[in-house]
Image: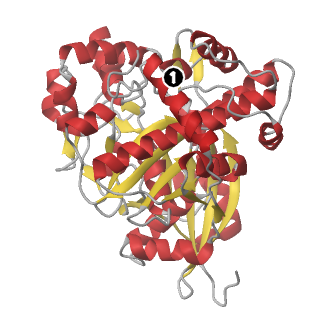
Amino acid sequence: MGFDLKPLIILAFDLGASGGRAIIGKIDLDARKLEMEEVHRFPNGPIRVREHLYWDVLSIWSEVKEGISIAYRKYGEQIASIGVDTWGVDFALLDNNGELVGLPYCYRDPRRSRAMKELLSVVPPEKIYMRTGIQFMPINPLYQLYAMVKDGSSLLQAARTLLMIPDLFNYWLTGVIVSEYTDASTTQFLDPWTKKWAFDLLEEIGFPTNIFPEIIEPGTKLGNIDPRLAEELRVGKDIMVIAPATHDTASAVVATPIDENSAYISCGTWSLVGVELDKPLVNKKAMEYNFTNEGGAFNTIRFLKNVQGMWFMQEIRRMLAKRGQEYSYTELTKLAEKARGVIGFIDPDDPRFLAPLDMIEEIMRFLEETGQEKPRTVGELVRLVLESLALKYRFVIEKIEDLAGKRIKRINIVGGGSRNWLHNQLVADFTNRLVEAGPEEATSIGNILMQLAGLGYVKSLREIREYVRNSFEVKQYIPNHTSKHEDAYSKFLSILEKTGGLAGWALRI
């Protein structure tokens, strides 16, 4: 793509659970096109200290500053704005001086599962769901707060402000303390109709309600970069900081070219399987199926369910490396392509897979306990996981059809997982639906285009998705569905029934 005039330059930070990136967006306003350039990349991951898992947000902040410096050296005063999105469900605490109180806990911290089980024995699950519309998962911040209250946490006693992770970086960028709606909606203590904190629920669990900031909409201008930071990095003081849809999935959905007959799978560490609605869908059946109503851009609801996604590939690859077997993701996919299929299945959402010490051993244990054949090769192991993911997606999509009263004809897969062609084809085959994969950089694209909205250049999701369609190709995967896939789905459902995977909100914790 070429530009006759200088393009509008926007800098996006996409901070995920396994890595972060700084992406430059070059926007041709006349052609309504976007070009992407990665200028910085760095790894990320939880750090285990004894029995707890933490995020090293100071290290991430150092990388964000480095990304700003690199971008500014290349584009200087052309940079119109900066925006940050991150993974959801984690938070940081600040003291009365605005200083960080300890390192944030990771959502995979084992304490949350114990706290969830205890809280749901004290507060009826139906009361929580009807108040918030959020699925029951041990990763939700509600349970970390409850654990801190029960433990009499000194961190909580020192806290004067609670900020979700993207809000923390926005605070460090600007000095402004606010909470962006899409990420706040992942907490399980936000009212999905009023978009305000559910203080009554927080008070019921004994949590102080005076530490929660004002909630703002995605696309809000937060102000110019903090002058002290600008001086430190030697960058211009007029760069605007805009809150995009700061939850990475919300940004990804913004850039997903869906229609009313489409479901999306935002596939990264997690696979978020859902549809876009114009209002919350909260009822007893949605609770039993354990669906969530998270906030989207432009007054939409992301009605979805979390499925553990490429986390399996990450952990399998890591465990193989520990065994002295180094594979790239491409090599693992090629091995899976040639391997036997339909030898056994796991439930990707069994709690044992949330943070195992050894993913491979945990998969083998699940297969043994459910009386299934174990994979004999690395390729068979990877294929078993990919087929299990495809089957779980089908299960979730069928529940969406039931709840929303619509027929899903097409699945859009976006995010890093959309690069895995075997995964995409298996999804088409096992769900018997057309799959369109891409754009793979949907989160960064959505981040950039929501900043464009904040700058006043676009006014709707329709306009944003026009930029997406003009700028990026999607690949189609035609289903090759046979009786073999139906038989596999029947077996998969029997395994879910055997292990409690059909239990809806009553998670097996």
The quarter holding residue 334 reads top right
Task: Locate residue 444: give its quadrant.
Answer: bottom right
- Going by the picture, which residue comes out furthest to the front? 483
Residue 264: x %, y % from top left? 48, 54
Say if 37 sits above or below 228 in the image. Answer: below
At a point 48% along the width and 68% down the height, the residue shown is 449
Please tell me which residue lies in front, 113 or 155: 113
Tell me the residue at 48%/49% (across/down).
Answer: 248
Q: Is residue 503 above or below residue 225?
A: above
Q: Up-down: is 425 above or below 507?
A: below
Residue 152's x, y, as percent? 29, 10
In what quadrant of the picture does the C terminus appear? Answer: top left
- For the residue pair 130 and 21, the one nearer the viewer reads as 130
Asked if residue 4 can be seen in this view, the reply is yes
Q: In this image, 428 relative to 282: left or right?
A: right
The residue depicted at 49 percent of the width and 77 percent of the height is: 466
> Which residue lies under the disc numbered 1?
495
Residue 496: horizontal and vertical position, in percent? Answer: 47, 24
Which residue occupies 24% across, 48% down? 281
Quarter of the rendering containing residue 359: top right
Left of 120 or right of it: where is 472? right
In this rendered view, identify the residue nearer to me: 150 or 341.
341
Q: Foreground residue, 446 or 253?
A: 253
Note whether residue 158 is visible: no
Label 1 amino acid? Answer: Ile
Quarter of the figure with the N terminus: bottom right
